[in-house]
Amino acid sequence: MKLTSLTAVFIARDFCASIETVRALADALAERVVDVNIIIVANGAGSVTARTLNALASAIPDVTVLYLATEQHDDVARLLGLNSDRRLYFVLHADFGRDRGSR
């Protein structure tokens, strides 16, 4: 039995996973969930990361990028990601790319 819908919220700062990695994640989730939405919160990300995120959003359906002009606490970034979608099930991840420790 598949879940009806799921939103995965990730935070990106100065690094973002590759298009191939995000596509593999989206495909894996789609095998288990009918309607998947991936939200990436660019938490004070630089211009290089922003360009990569724009490419991700253009290349992969159901990827949404929210941009924060200045870096906020991770909890604030997660809440903005959650608030942008009204789903019943969510998956949260601390950092979308390299592990930078807890913030």
Image (cartoon, helix red, strand yellow):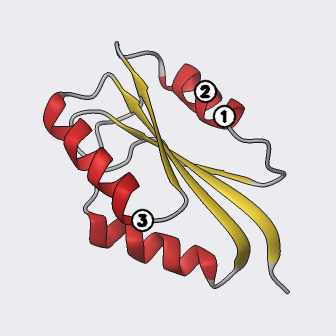
State how many labels appear.
3
Q: In the picture, residue 65 is in which quadrant?
A: top left
Rendered location of residue 15, percent (x, y): 22, 43
Q: SS class of the residue under badge 3? A: loop
Name the amino acid type tagged 3: Ile
Q: Which dot, 2 or 3, sits closer to the camera?
A: 3
Q: Mark 1, residues whose alpha carbon is within 10 Å: few (<14), some, or many (≥20)?
A: few
Name the amino acid type tagged 1: Ser
Q: SS class of the residue under badge 1? A: loop
Q: Which residue is mark 2?
A: 80
Q: CA distance from mark 2 to mark 3?
A: 21 Å
Name the amino acid type tagged 2: Leu
Report the side of 96 relative to 90 (left or right).
left
State the quadrant of the N terminus: bottom right
Q: Mark 2, residues whose alpha carbon is within 10 Å: few (<14), some, or many (≥20)?
A: some
Q: Which residue is mark 3?
A: 60
**Which badge, 2 or 3, comes first in the chain's sequence?**
3
Q: Which residue is mark 1?
A: 84
